[in-house]
Image (cartoon, grey):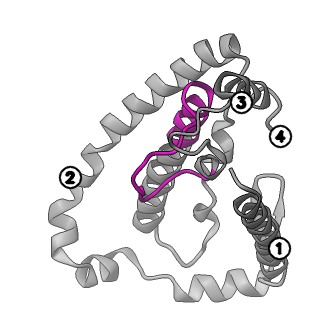
Amino acid sequence: MNDRIRHVLDQMALLEEDLRIALEEQEASMLFEIKGKRVEFEQSIREAHRRLKTGFFRWLVAYRPQNLITGPIIYAMIVPLALVDLCVSFYQATCFPIYGVVRVRRGDYIVFDRQRLEYLNFIEKFHCTYCAYGTGVIAYIAEIVARTEEYFCPIKHARRMLGVHPRYKRFLDFGDAADYEKRLEAFRVGLGRIE
């Protein structure tokens, strides 16, 4: 990787950190606090949320019929999601310690906090729980696979690829064979020190 690209990547990392701090500051002004794993709103916000809640029967009448029709298809996806979650978790639990790779914390990716939103009725909260699990599992699996790729093959593709994981930008350039084994080992050692 040339110095210009490394410099741009370092600038991107600094900007990402600035963005993370700005988002945390914005959250602090949103009239809620995060206490451990719980989100707590001020009393006045909770009361305003309760007034905005749509009752179940009103929600059912106003709900889009196509969403009700496709609901069973959407919720049937819980089976393959749970199965792949179980398989990838087993893979990580058994193989990562052997490779010396720090394990991915599942709780960092699968977050259930929308149940604290008083303006959602119980069906909407159920939908949110399903979506939080689905998107969380996909992100969790993506990080496990990204660490696996970094361990075995930290080489960029020749063609541009959409949707790459954050680790990909530090991978070796396609065709850059200089000191490959030494640099591969550096990636592997680094995976044992992930914060």
Quickly name the residue at label 4: 195
Give whichever of discs 4 and 2 has the lower sequence position: 2
Give the numbered dot on residue 18: 1
Element under disc 4:
loop
User: Disc 1 residue type?
Assistant: Asp
Residue at the image position 45 percent from the left and 64 percent from the top: 122
Query: Residue 62 versus residue 113: which sits nearer the camera?
Result: 113
Which marked residue is nearer to the observer: mark 3 or mark 4? 3
Q: Earlier in the sequence, mark 3 or mark 2?
A: 2
Q: Which residue is mark 2?
A: 72
| Mark linked to residue 65 | none
Q: Earlier in the sequence, mark 3 or mark 4?
A: 3
Front: mark 1 or 3: 3
Q: As shown in the figure, which amino acid type bears the numbered disc 4?
A: Glu
- Under mark 2, the amino acid is Pro
Amino acid beneath label 3: Arg
Q: Which mark is residue 183?
A: 3
Residue 39 locus on image (x, y percent): 75, 64
CA gap, disc 4 and disc 2: 40 Å
Name above or below for residue 69 compared with residue 37.
below
On screen, residue 41 versus residue 60, left or right, reads: right
- CA distance for labels 1 and 3: 29 Å
Read off the magenta span.
141-166
